[in-house]
Every structure is written in structure tokens, then in C-alpha cells.
Image: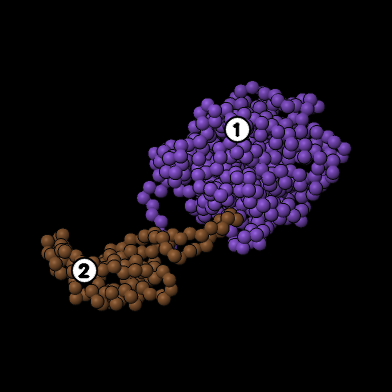
Chain colours: A brown, B purple
Amino acid sequence: MKKVEAIIRKSKFDEVKKALHEIEVNFFSYWDVTGVGNEKQGHVYRGISYSTTDIQRRYLVIVVSDDFLDRTIKTLLESAATGNVGDGKIFVSDVIEAYRIRTGESGSAGIN
Amino acid sequence: MEAGLFTANNVWMMVCTGLVFFMHLGFSFLEIGLTRQKNTVNILFKNVFIICVGLLLYYVGGFNLMYPGFEDGDAGFLKFAGFGIAAPENGMTPDYADGGYTWWTDFLFQGMFAATAATIVSGAVAERIKLGSFMLFTIVYVGLVYPIVGSWQWGGGFLSSLAYGKAEGFYDFAGSTLVHSVGGWGALIAIYLLGARIGKFGEDGKPKAIPGHNLPLTAAGVLILWLGWFGFNGGSVLSADPELTSLVLVTTSLAAAAGGVSAFLTSLIAYKNYDLTMFLNGILGGLVGITAGADQMSPNEAVIIGVLAGIIIVLGVALIDKLKLDDPVGAVAVHLICGIWGTLAVGIFGQLASFDQFLVQLAGVGAAATFCSVTGFIILFTIKKVAGLRVSEQEEMEGLDIHEHGMDAYADFRMNQH
């Protein structure tokens, strides 16, 4: 099992979600995050100009069986991309075990 | 006078009383919107305190300090007609105040005005003043300073009979000076003694933006204030006189509209962006500017006063930043600077315009400036020395809501950021 963490644009979230559902990755968690990056956004407030490097993104955590990994990554790369700076990152790591709380099932049965 | 007309007059004045009351909600929304969410409960608490205590103080002594019954020709400066309120014998008849309203209406209409002066200060000192110190200041400023200045003009004191050449006396229809500048001077002195919020000026001394957290509330507040101004100026006719009330509503609205448009255009030219907060401040500037002469101006003159007020707002906000003062809501630019502008405009435009009138208006501005800044300084400086004005650094960073009140304004509310 692998854990796929993806930081994506919020504007791409609906597309990514739909694409993941199409390859039958139906369960994942997400939350909104603020990060610091190279992208700068200009603001003016009451005559004072300022720019902020704080950027808003959405953070997805998807745990998948090994045989789902490749298509998950491929789907993310395709659906989350705009080609511009700031499209995000994907991290993959090993998961030792997974359990479904209701039934106590573990492994692949625990996540699908 | 017919009973029907007396009733109609009184009903209009009570409607106006309600509209002026509604302005306190407008001020609250405006102040909340232009500050950070961690101080929202604190600002609401101050505004609710102001309207309640302001009215009670006006009942205890304010009304009789503001309308003490100066004798004709005694150029009154200070007189007190005693504690409490009690209607005179003719107070409920058309003999009182030319049948414009009853004595009770008179008290409540004026009482709704009184608290406004402290509300103006509240916005300027937001996000860093100690609650207790602010409440103490409000009590003295609304209880004493506002009614004394008011008595000089509306109470029949020395400003109202300040004749010079062609001018028969100082003129301030609904309070560009008596209400707005009085509050504005208090605000200016207070932000000078308080100092800027942490983070308002960088180490290089350059001003930084501390964006307000809720512009929808700010916009609602300003539009509510505009509505309230129909009562503030419309009621200052002191009867339902058809011609004067309708003229006043026209000049008031035109000045507000012109002030808003000119402020957003000035800001667009100066800063290359469509700044909603400047647009809204411009509307308020136009309203404050027309207030001194709302019944004296033609529609064209009202528009000119509004346009200039809008430009003054944008320059005024920049000036306050230049002076290293921190006024989160622009209260000094709106109420003080546009209040002065509106007062002087009575000597430049409208039916009273003359150089003599201009000088008398200038004298009135000077009298209010001297009295308010001196008394304001004494009150605030004393509080600063005795109890302190400013919250601790930790409290300011973490928010006054949790430290002064132990509560959050938006306890389980979550923002959906783009």
C-alpha cells in the first residue's frame, strides 16, 4: 500500500476529484493549506501596495493498493496540471498497514 | 397650528430619531469590517456600550447641559439646567418649538445624536485600546465635552450669536462641526496618544496594509449610515416642513453619491486600483461634508461639496499614514477633515456664502478644535497615566476578543479561501 499526498490548486479540485472517481479511487481526505512559494500576488489596500507570497492550496491524502498507484499518479498529473508555475507537488510513501474500523479488515480489504 | 400638522411634524421627527438610532448599527458594521476578526466582539461591545451609556448620560445631565436655556445676548459658554429630564408645561403642545415636535421627541432625537461622537472615536482606536479606559473616556467625552460644545450653537450659546459683518452667527445645520469634528478631534488625539497597531509601520517607517476582515459588513455599514443620514439631516429641519426636508434629503444624497464617485476615481488615479473601502469612505465624506449646510445648498453646490470631500478622503487617509498615525477605519479623514470642510463650505457655497460668514465658520471650527483637543488630551492623558490606554503586546497579537471578553466572534465559522 502507498500513501499519495498531492498539493494541488483549489481551482483544479473538482476536476481531480472527478478524474479519481473515474479510475475508482473513491475515498480520500483533503484539507486547505497555506504555503509559501515563489508565486507573488499583488494587493492594494487603502492606497498601500503590498504583495504576499502566501499561497492557498488543497492537500489531498490518498491511500491506495500497490496496483492502483500508477494510474493514481497518472491521473493526478493529468488532471491537476495547468502548465503554469504553482501546479503543485505529489509525494508517495509506504504504508505499513490499514484497517477498516467497522469490520476490522486489514490490508487492501481495509481501504477499498 | 392645527393638531394634524403638529402630529405629522412629530411623527416625522420620531422616524428621524429611529433612523439616527440605526446609524449606530452602521458604525458598528463599518468598524468591524475594516478591522481583524480577532477584535470583533470588542468593537461590538464598545458600540453597544456607547449607545446605552450615551443615552443614559444624556438623560442624567447631557440634555440640560446642551440646552441649558441661555438668555438672549449673553453669549453663553457654560450653563447647566439641572439633572434629569422633565417636560416643561407646554412641552406636549404646538407652543413648544413652533409645533415641530414634542419635548419627549426633542430629548430622544438629541440623545441619539449624542452617542455618535464617541462612536467616531471607537473606530479610530480599534484593535489596541483597553476596554475599561475607552469606556471611561466615552463617559467623560459624551457626558461633558459633546454637550458643552453643542450648547455653544444649538443650545443658543456664543457661537450661534457670533455676528461679524454680513454674518449673523456661526452655522452648523446638523453637525459637521458639533458632532463629526467633535468626534474627529477626540479620535485624532486618541490615536496620537495610543500609537499605531503592531505591524502598521515597518522598521523602515513605511505604512503597511492591515486589511479589514469583512468588506460585505463594511459596505452594509456605509449604506445603513447613508439611510440613517436621512434622519440625521432630515430631522435637523426640526419639523416636517415639506420644502426643507425634501431639499435636505436631495442635497444629502447627492453629496454622498458625488463623494463616493470622486473618492474612487481619485484613488483609481493615485493607486491604479478600484478600492472599495475608499469608495465607501468617500460616501461618508460627502455625507459629513454636506451636513453643515444641507438646507442651504442647491443640488449643484451639494455635488461640488461631495466631489471635494471625496478627494479630501483619499488625500486625508494618505496624510494620516504619512504622519505615522494609525486610523484603521479612516475616522479622522471622514469625520474631522470632511467635518471641517463642510463647515467652511457654508461660507463658500449656498445662501449664506460670504467672506464674513467664512471667517465666522473658521472661528467656530477653531473654537471646537481648541476645546475638544485640549479636553480630549487632558482626559486621555490622565487615563494613560492612571490606568494605561493600551493593551499588552500579547493581548494585541492574540486579539482583544479572547483577552478582554473571553469569547470569539466567529466561534465555529470557517472561511473558504480561494
Front-most of A30 and B353?
A: A30
Q: Which residue occupies 51% across, 28% down?
A: B387
Callout 2 and callout 1 share a chain? no
Secondary structure under badge 1?
helix
Q: At 29% from the left edge and 68% from the top edge, which residue is drawn?
A: A91
Q: Is residue A23 above or below residue B62?
A: below
Across and down, in percent, residue B71 comes to 77, 25
The amino acid marked with disc number 1 is Val
The residue where tag 2 is placed is A2
Q: Nearer the viewer, mark 2 or mark 1?
A: 2
Is B408 rendered above or below residue A18? above
Which residue is rendered at x = 54% and y = 30% of the image? B384
Specify the quadrant of the image occupied by residue B191: top right
Chain letter behind tag 2: A
Q: Position of residue B305 (x, y in %)?
A: 73, 52
Mark 2 and mark 1 in contact? Answer it, CB < 8 Å.
Answer: no
Q: Nearer the viewer, residue B373 or B111?
A: B373
Point out which mark residue B142 bears: 1
Q: In x, y percent, where is residue A25?
A: 25, 72
Marker disc for residue B122: none
Badge 2: how crowded within 10 Å, few (<14), some, or many (20+)? Answer: some
Q: Nearer the viewer, residue B372 or A55?
A: A55
Percent across and percent down for residue B408 are 40, 44
Instruction: Name the image quarter holding residue B166.
Output: top right
The Cα atoms of the two marked residues, 2 and 1, are separated by 68 Å
Q: Is residue A59 visible?
A: yes
Please rate how many residues cluster around mark 1, counting C-alpha atoms within 10 Å: few if below 14, some from 14 to 19, many from 20: many
Chain on which label 1 sits: B
Q: Is residue A14 left or right of residue B69?
A: left
Q: Residue at x 62, y 40 (%)?
A: B188
Q: Residue furthest toward the right?
A: B165
A87 is higher (above) or lower (below) than B136: below
